Amino acid sequence: MEGRQLDIEVTETTVLDNPEKARLALARLRESGVSISLDDFGTGFTSLSLLAELPLDVVKIDRLFMEDVESNDRSRAVVGSVINMAHALNLRVVGEGVETNAQLEVLDELGCDEIQGYLISRPQPADQITAFLVNQRNSEQARRA
């Protein structure tokens, strides 16, 4: 497998155990083409300077911030700030735990790059998710025709 075919997710807490060791290990992986995501952002105590120093491609905003993003101005401001900061660092942003269309609309307005969550699909075995993805692709191709 080529490095560009692999995405690795690390959690804030894993990185915080030994930030310098993590930075070096992630840099080696990234040099081989592996994409690096920081998962569950916002649940630990990652400093902004550490975020800027790590060789990352993606920041995944923890689902806790999604629970009331459509109804709570403070939550919306925090999520928007994380998205803006990540984009300023040339990172893609994934909103985790998206369960409603209202959450999706807010994240879209805030410029979030991708989402994951029950709104798209619940976790599924490999054969079922493959069938789901094939069906999605076929539906998309039919819409274009």
Image: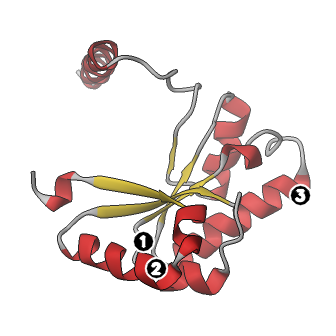
Residue situated furthest front in the rendering? 17
Q: Amino acid at mark 2?
A: Leu
Q: Amino acid at mark 3?
A: Arg
In the image, is residue 144 above or below residue 73? above
Query: Residue at left 40%, top 67%?
Result: 57
Q: Residues within 10 Å of mark 2 (few under 14, many from 20)?
A: some
Residue 41, percent from left and from top: 62, 60
What's the distance in space between the residues labelled 2 and 3, CA to CA? Answer: 27 Å
Say whether residue 69 is left or right of residue 46. right
In the image, is residue 88 above or below residue 97? below
In the image, is residue 79 above or below residue 15? above
Which mark identifies residue 139?
none
Q: Quadrant of residue 47?
A: bottom right
Residue, disc 1: 56
Say whether residue 32 is left or right of residue 114. left
Residue 43, percent from left and from top: 71, 57
Residue, disc 3: 74
Query: Are circles 1 and 2 on residues that touch, CB within 8 Å?
Result: yes
Residue, disc 2: 54
Which quarter of the image is occupied by the C terminus? top left
Q: Amino acid at mark 1?
A: Leu
Q: Earlier in the sequence, mark 2 or mark 3?
A: 2
Query: Are circles 1 and 3 on residues that touch, CB within 8 Å?
Result: no
Q: Quadrant of residue 36?
A: bottom left
Residue 45, percent from left and from top: 71, 70
What's the distance in space between the residues labelled 1 and 3, CA to CA? Answer: 26 Å
Q: Residues within 10 Å of mark 1 (few under 14, many from 20)?
A: many
What's the distance in space between the residues labelled 1 and 2, CA to CA? Answer: 6 Å
